[in-house]
Amino acid sequence: MKVIRNYIEIAKPGIILANLISTAGGFFLASGGRVDISVLLAILTGVSLVVASGCVCNNCIDRDIDRLMKRTCNRVLARRVLPVGSAWFYASFLGIVGVALLGTAANMLSVAIVLAGFGIYVGIYSLRLKRTCVYATLVGSLAGAAPPLAGYCAAANRFDGGAAILLAIFIVWQIPHYYAIAIFRFDDYAAAAIPILPVKQGTSAAKIHIFGCILVFIAASLMLTFCGYTGYSYLAVTAVSGLAWLFIALSGYNTSDERLWARKLYIFSILAMLALSFMMSIDSTFIG
């Protein structure tokens, strides 16, 4: 049982769940109420397996810096309780099965999007930019936007205006989300010499980026309604959650405890994503 738990842990189930929710949101947004359950289950399972593969690869690549950070020093590979070779094999198995499932049940556009996201996350972000570039998060955000985009394109069978808006939403959502983590885990990132923007350029610069990205997030989110993809229930919920997130970001300019503020910002970023994904699923279904 302990070995099984280790394999589950290195796949990062929390990240898989978050991507499942956003993928489903993208799928329902494009389906307009005409849901093919078999395709939905295939895209959710396939994306989950590929995301899990990427997470295992990331754990393999980051095991040295994970040992330097309090948040990650107890990860399985950082503690050397699982052979790295076994982890790489596990990642390969998950990725191959996930891509094969997507290739047989979804369309090749979705497969290409998932593979591009995997390549960016593992090959560009994890292997190179995370340790060398202050703007690595911007590149990594492309990978994070791949699952909901793949879900959308699996249902729509094309890349259209809705897909472009969805891509923009999830790219700009991730930047405040990860900068918030870097601020309240500042010492960890500094100890591991990860040149993320809050560490390299300071929290003041990060706050400007956070505020700007949340503004773009709100504008992009509302475009789904203005362009006819969702209705006014989605508009209301998304506007309220986006403005609340923006208010929290603004409160960072007057806070006496930046790390507590950043933790609140991080938690609310998750709530905003969940609200948006849920309302995309519900509202676009009724619109369709």
Image: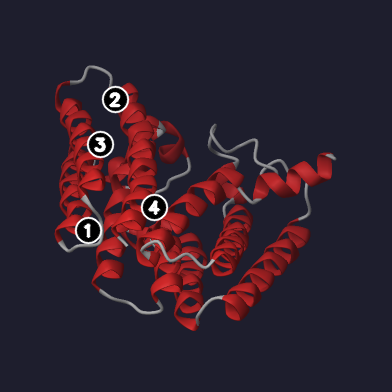
Q: Residues within 10 Å of mark 3 (few under 14, many from 20)?
A: some
Q: Which residue is mark 4?
A: 281
Mark 3 or 2 closer to N-term?
3
Mark 3 or 4 closer to N-term?
3
Q: Secondary structure at mark 3?
A: helix
Quarter of the image that includes the N terminus: top right
Q: Which label sits on residue 241? A: 3
- Residue at image coords 43%, 53%: 22
The amino acid type found where label 3 is placed reads: Ser
Q: Which label sits on residue 224? A: 1
Of discs 3 and 2, which sits in the foreground? Answer: 3
The amino acid type found where label 4 is placed reads: Ser
Picture quadrant of residue 78 = top right
The answer to whether residue 133 is visible is no
Q: Which residue is mark 2?
A: 261
The reply, left or right, for residue 56 in relation to residue 139 is right
Of discs 3 and 4, which sits in the foreground? Answer: 4
Q: Does residue 144 sit above or below 97 in this rendering?
A: above
